[in-house]
Amino acid sequence: MAKRFEYSEDIGYPVDRVHATLTDPVFWRHRFEEAPEKLTLDESGGPGTLTATMRDSISASSLPGLVRKVVSGELRVERADEWGPLDGNRADGRIRGSSTGIPVRIECASVLRASGEGSVLELIGSVEVKIPLVGGQIESLIKKLVRDMVGQDRDAIEKWLGDS
């Protein structure tokens, strides 16, 4: 059974600037400048939209012990962030994640909205790992990874905007 989660991060910049960053191919290319082959960008959704798909490989030896028990070799993970246009003080998006090696599915609705002088990035989603007995424990680990990911995204956005 899938585990649900809700996370939010305050971002110290106005929603229009944050949205412009999230839909800017230059921002994403900068984040992946050391491994550009891990990133695919799709701007076909129209102005103010972007889908950034990130792929990575993780050696089983670097995974937590619980996960190493069910994975042999390399784990390939994929994350796709989709952002729609800014509509007033809000933009809706979606984040999906999956992997090979572990039958995992992550689905999130994301919202970027204005909050005072800044913005809030909210995620509501679920993670499901279809492995008998240990799937629930792995789902808990992945929920933490998603939380960490949202914090890293916030940090990258704030650094980008602070440097510009």
Image (spheres, rainbow, N blue to C red):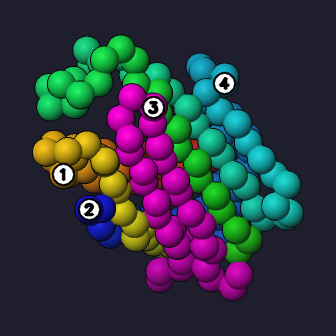
Three-letter amino acid code at disc 1? Gly
What mark, if any, has residue 1 been given in the picture? 2
Tell me the amino acid under the disc marked 4: Pro
Disc 2, disc 1: CB below 8 Å?
A: yes
Q: Residue at x 85, y 55 (%)?
A: 44
Q: CA distance from mark 1 to mark 3?
A: 18 Å
Label 2 vs label 3: CA separation?
A: 19 Å
| Of labels 4 and 1, the one closer to you | 1
Asked whether residue 64 is in view, the answer is no
Decide which of 31, 72 is in the foreground and name it.
Answer: 72
Q: Are marks 2 and 4 in contact (CB under 8 Å)?
A: no
Q: On residue 36, which mark appears? A: 4
User: Which segment did they paint magenta?
Assistant: 87-116
Q: Which residue is mark 3?
A: 100
Label 3's element? strand
Viewer-proximal residue among 98 and 120: 98
Residue 123 shows in this picture: yes
Residue 136 circle label: 1
